[in-house]
Amino acid sequence: MAGTVGRPRRRPDTLFADRGYDHDNYRRLLRERGIRPAIAERGQPHGTGLGTFRWVVERTISWLHGFRRLRIRRERRDDIHEAFLGLAVCLITQRHVQRLCQDLQVRETTEAIVGAVTGPLSAPSGLLLGRYDDHGRLQYTGRTTTLARAASATVAGLLAPARRGHPWTNWSFSAGWGSRTR
């Protein structure tokens, strides 16, 4: 991905800080270095929005402190400590990905035949789907949700009226998943 031309920045655009750093000297020093201070002011009500950024940092540090080896640094060499830090970040990320995957519903898809429609053929509002069983009979398997206008128009151009001898002739389909013959 292309970035801006020139040397990479070494300083942040903005520095977020809490009320403990609310002093004109700190603000002046930051501005001299080209950094915009976003420091909460003492005596002002909470709700400036700084807490949203601070919470992310504190939460991340809390997750890292969950690993005993990182909570109190005993490594003398920086590279070893950095390796453990990288390993901890990998484990935290893996846990979040696992939790995310458990929350997702996995659905299998398969081919189906449009056996009937709800509404007119020129503008169907839903499709009743079926599959052939082992004996060659068209069995009802499910229905779609209400079709959007664009989808309805696209499907309408592909549909044709049922021919004589359609297996679902004289069937009524309930609002649920079942079906019955009349």
Image (cartoon, helix red, strand yellow):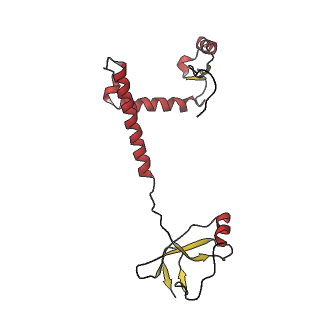
Residue 71 horizontal side relative to residue 40, left or right: left
Position of residue 56 measured from the top left corner of the image (x, y, whole percent): 49, 32
Eyeballing the image, is 181 above or below 45?
below
Position of residue 83 measured from the top left corner of the image (x, y, whole percent): 36, 27
Residue 63 horizontal side relative to residue 39, left or right: left
Q: Which residue is drawn at 36% across and 21% down?
A: 79
Which residue is at the front of the view, 18 or 130? 130
Visible in this render: residue 39?
A: no
**Quadrant hosting residue 77:** top left
Which residue is at the front of the view, 54 or 122? 122
The quadrant the N terminus occupies is top right
Residue 16 horizontal side relative to residue 93, left or right: right
Which residue is at the front of the view, 36 or 91? 91
Q: How many numbered circles does the render carry?
A: 0
Eyeballing the image, is 7 above or below 1?
above
Position of residue 173 measured from the top left corner of the image (x, y, whole percent): 53, 79
